[in-house]
Image (tube, grey):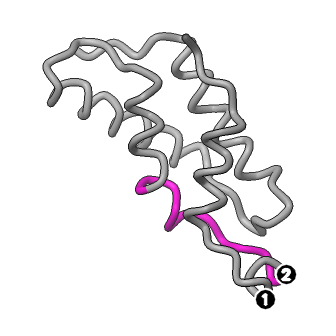
Amino acid sequence: AVTLAEEVAFYIVALIRATRAHADIASGASPRAGVLLANAARSRAALDGRDYVLPDDVKALAPATLRHRLLLSPAAEIEGRQVEDIVAGLIETTEAPR
């Protein structure tokens, strides 16, 4: 019974889409990854005693939820880029609701 506001859902979708548009990612996150991220954020909110999800819940769980679902491009692998750093950058650059 944890509410996921429409704005937070749109934020999750924006993060998922950003993984598919990033030049260093050969294979981005799927819609299913977005559903799992939303469920994880709901769980975090419930564990914190809230009945609503904050964008901070999504930000906190996105790295762990998305890192194993992304495949780096060959060029990014050669350059030694890390998926965690790319996800952190996407979290920083994707506008979150207030």
Q: Residue at x 25, y 25 (%)?
A: 45
Magenta segment, principal secondary structure? Answer: helix
Local crowd at mark 2 within 10 Å, few (<14), some, or many (≥20)? few
Q: Is residue 77 left or right of residue 58?
A: right
Which corner quadrant holds the N terminus? Answer: top left
- Secondary structure at badge 1 equals helix
Residue 22 against residue 53 in the figure, above or below: below
Q: Residue at x 23, y 12 (%)?
A: 51
Decide: marks 2, 1 in contact (CB < 8 A)? yes
Q: Nearer the viewer, residue 44 or 82?
A: 82
Residue 58 sits in quarter:
top left
Tell me if residue 73 is in the magenta stretch.
yes
Q: Nearer the viewer, residue 54 or 29?
A: 54
Q: Residue at x 64, y 39 (%)?
A: 92
Q: CA distance from mark 2 to mark 1?
A: 5 Å
Residue denoted by label 2: 75
Residue 8 screen position, x and y as percent? 52, 19
- The magenta span reads 64-74
Most extreme residue toward the bottom is: 78
- Secondary structure at badge 2 equals helix
Which corner quadrant holds the C terminus? Answer: top right
Residue 77 screen position, x and y as percent? 73, 83
Residue 24 against residue 32 in the figure, above or below: below
Mark number for residue 78? Answer: 1
